[in-house]
Amino acid sequence: MKSIVENFDLFAPKLVDKEEYYSSGHRACQGCGEALAIRLMAKALGKDTVVTNATGCMEVTATPYPTTAWKLPWVHVAFPNSASVGAGVESALRVLRRKGKIADRYIKVVSIGGDGGSFDIGFQAISGAMERGHDMIYIVYDNEAYMNTGIQRSGATPFGASTTTAPAGKESVGNKNWKKNMAEIMVAHRVPYVATATHSHPIDFMNKVKKARKVNGPAFIHCLAVCPTGWRSSSETCIKLGRLAVETGVFPLYEVENGKYKFSPDNPPKLRPLEDYLKPQGRFRHLTPDQINIFRDMAMIEYNKVLERVKHSKSWSELK
Amino acid sequence: MVSFIIDGKKVEAEAGANVLQVARKYGIVIPTLCCHESVAPSGACRLCVVEVKKGKRTRIVTSCLYPVDEGIVVETKTDRVLNVRRLVMQLLMARCPESEVLKDMAKEMGIEPQPAFHPDTDKGKCVLCRLCVKACEDVVGASAIGLSGRGKNKKVGAPFMEDSKTCIGCGACAYICPTEHIIMESTDSKRKIWGRTFKMQPCDKCGRYFAPVDQLKFISDKTGTPMTELAVCMSCK
């Protein structure tokens, strides 16, 4: 048996880094899960990091001219190309290192983007960067719609969510499809480390980011970030909703190391009823019991798919 | 505020700060193993050595313990510093030959193991940095582990290497250990650390095993919170 240093409660939070790299005073909404997730990510990554940020909430709220909340080198790029700029920065750093200009340190490049900038618009850039095997991390903050521009649906919006471009009404249930399984797509790119996380499980999230930093090659983390504004929930439920997403099985936490699936210890042994997750959110208010059943079926397909893979998947070294 | 020079750069810092803190603030890399914000610095790993010139005298000091002073000149990358750092690293690698953390660090610093140093086989991955002992004492407040023995027999563990009665199984030592020497094995209902097996508390509401019973008792005694309130996991609170 190997040492399991992941299921910590109570004392581990006292031992995490106290240095802040994403400072307070940014303009994110009350109860923003995304800002919290970025703060935790920056803490886990540490000082020697370059961040490239696609357009989105986190760019708009963190850097209104002439201020910035970032204490790390940070590049804002257009909506589609966070990953390609990250790849370019990584190549440049590699050359500088080879020439001995930054010989004393290893600098990690982290590209971040929202679900719009990753699932839809920035998709080909991510696909390219991951497939070329750049030594970088891509972290997507998934708040399940284009929240920055006013809650338009994206490829990450779940079934039944009412958005401004997929409104619920007499004829429509809101968004008609289930969200794209981005982690799975990244596994198909043969990315050595893929993980899903939420800001509501901070130690788990930070451990995953630290693990991704150690990977020599591409790594991908899909982080669910609660958006009280767009999810039409009250701001104090931010952490609770992230936890409920995991506990009801809507967003299972797992990591894929070299093709081998592993369930994270924060997943509950028994799932809670789905209604606990849907009820506090105004975007699901209109769902009838029949529609909730459709939602449950769609969520369970994804959940059971992960369970199956955890049981049967093999790492690449075993498949040789 | 005092002003002094690090690597030719004029810097300012609060009086009482240590050289290591100031250097890191100005983006200068100094490798460390035993430095952690939550506990006081102790200068145990010796990797953070730098050269300090004060008046006419130049000497090698541990930067994590050396307080800044007006007019000192600090050099972090001279040949003398790198020589000392290499020797320290090679001695650490000879002590813990199987430690991946040390191997990665050495690779980063471009240091090869010294073949003349005979590798130890009985020390595990422990570099005797005392982080775990201090975390147990200062952060947790249990004081369950300590160092025993002298010289080459010095090692970390519970008193007399027996099952410690004061250990609460929180795992803070395993979390803080820089070289992953301390092993904590967890299955659902049991957790094993320092040779003792702890019973885990299932959550009253969801049934997930979330913390050792002894740890909850410890928190209950310390804060006066009744056990019934503590027996609910973070998710269900």
Image (cartoon, helix red, strand yellow):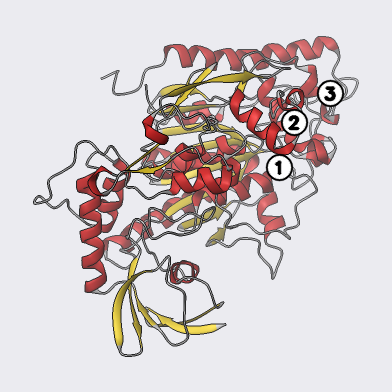
Instruction: Give neighbour class at mark 3: few <14, some 14-19, many 20+ (Cα, 10 Å).
Output: few
Q: Which residue is mark 2?
A: A241
Whether the residues at callouts 1 and 3 have beta carbons within 8 Å, the answer is no
Write down the chain letter for disc 2.
A
Vertical position of residue B190 compared to residue A233: above or below: above
> Residue A236's image quarter?
top right
Labels 1 and 3 in the same subunit: yes
Q: Quadrant of the C terminus of chain A?
A: top left
Q: Which residue is mark 1?
A: A33
Disc 1 to disc 3, C-alpha distance = 19 Å
Instruction: Give neighbour class at mark 2: few <14, some 14-19, many 20+ (Cα, 10 Å).
Output: many
Vertical position of residue A66 compared to residue A141: above or below: below
Whether the residues at callouts 1 and 2 have beta carbons within 8 Å, the answer is yes
Labels 3 and 2 in the same subunit: yes
Q: Which residue is mark 3?
A: A279
Disc 1 to disc 2, C-alpha distance = 10 Å
Circle number at residue A309: none
Write down the chain letter for disc 3.
A
**Under tag 1, what secondary structure?**
helix
Instruction: Tell me, yes or no, if residue B212 can be seen here.
Output: no
Vertical position of residue B130 compared to residue A252: above or below: below
Along the viewing direction, whichever of A41 and B57 lies nearer the viewer: B57
